[in-house]
Image (cartoon, rainbow, N blue to C red):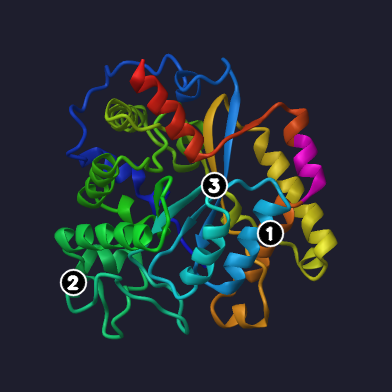
Amino acid sequence: MEIYLTHTSLAVVLISMSIISAKSSTAEAQDQTYAEKLGFPENATVLIMHIDDVGMSHDSNRGAIHAMEKGVANSLSIMMPCAWVPEFARYYKQHPDIDAGLHLTLTSEWDNYRWGPVSGATCNPSLADRQGAFYPSVEEVVQHAEPDEVEDEIRAQIELARNMGFSPTHLDSHMGTLFATADLMQIYINLGIEYQIPVMFPAGHSTLIRQQRQLTSDQHQQMQEAGRKLWAAGLPVLDDLHNFSYGWEIPREVADSDKKLQAYWTQKYIDSFEHLEPGVTMMIMHCTDPSETFAQISDSGTLRKADMLAMTSTRLKNYIEKEGIILTTWKELKRRRDSLQKK
């Protein structure tokens, strides 16, 4: 199963990030949420319901489309090196208004199905293993990858997306690889600024991610400094990140029944929403409609199916409406940020 090193290693990386202007325990407090800065109502809870791993497989595409067309999911990101991106590109041409970003990919973690650099393994050999695919783990990427080749590959993924007709609404990182070292994170943030594409980075009150990763006050202040850098560059910034569902466990008694699985997983999401604080939060999930062949890729099919079923739950939709949670997208956040630039 995927391990999101993004949020495991975030605290370590922030200690030495060269993009931070200064390390100081007296950094100014976050007196206003980024949601409020972007024009949402005071104390509003604003949520991006985001699907990772689009383009990874036909089943991933089908699950993501179903969760967005029939459910409350409203954002996704695409793994450009993967074989099923062309299928999703065709769908995108018919639905160009969807919120589609790039799930920047530097790892290939499965045994039987693998992918490699779009820039070419011979052009950037430090990114590829003996199969010509990306290394399976984040740790191996950190050990082998040269930063300039990482930058080349990210640029290649962005340019390939544009050549295929995508207009990326944001950038994030598959398995959190780009959060694993200060150098990689700097490349990630700097390219977001250069291309003027928002990047996934929780830099407001960060309540959920602080509790999940037990960040210190100094580390949180450093996150906020990075957020101010992104904001000053004209990009929207997240207040928090909801990244729990991939670690939830499915009881055996509900795994074989879609009805029971949907009810159980919907309640898990509702329970987790009780901890949302005001501000813009991105919620990460992996909606997939697994066929028999998906088991040849990963053993996470039931978990990913649970995400899809929960997103299409009428109960979840009603809960969001009842609680007054505002759903937004990266596209809307960028539009709001651009409008502030013009004032």
Q: Which dot, 1 or 2, sits closer to the camera? A: 1
Q: Which residue is mark 2?
A: 124
The residue shown at (71%, 50%) is 71
**Is there any visible trace of residue 228 in the rendered image?**
yes
Q: Secondary structure at mark 1?
A: helix
Of residues 297 and 54, the one nearer the viewer is 54
- Identify the element where label 2 is drawn: loop
Q: Residues within 10 Å of mark 2 (few under 14, many from 20)?
A: some
- Asked if the magenta segment contains residue 116, the reply would be no
Left or right of residue 6, residue 53 in this image:
right
Q: Position of residue 123 (x, y in %)?
A: 17, 74
Q: Nearer the viewer, mark 3 or mark 2?
A: 3
Q: CA distance from mark 3 to mark 2?
A: 34 Å
Give residue 28's position: percent from left, percent from top. 31, 16
Image: magenta residue range: 313-319
Q: Amino acid at mark 3?
A: Asp
Give the residue type that dot 1 points to.
His
Q: Which mark is residue 205?
A: none
Q: Is residue 110 above or below residue 173?
A: below
Q: Earlier in the sequence, mark 3 or mark 1?
A: 1
Dots 3 and 2: beta carbons under 8 Å? no
Please tell me in which quadrant of the rendered image residue 147 appears: bottom left
What residue does disc 1 label? 66
Residue 255 placement, left or right of 233: right
From the image, tell me which residue sits under label 3: 97
The residue sitting at 20% across, 66% down in the picture is 145
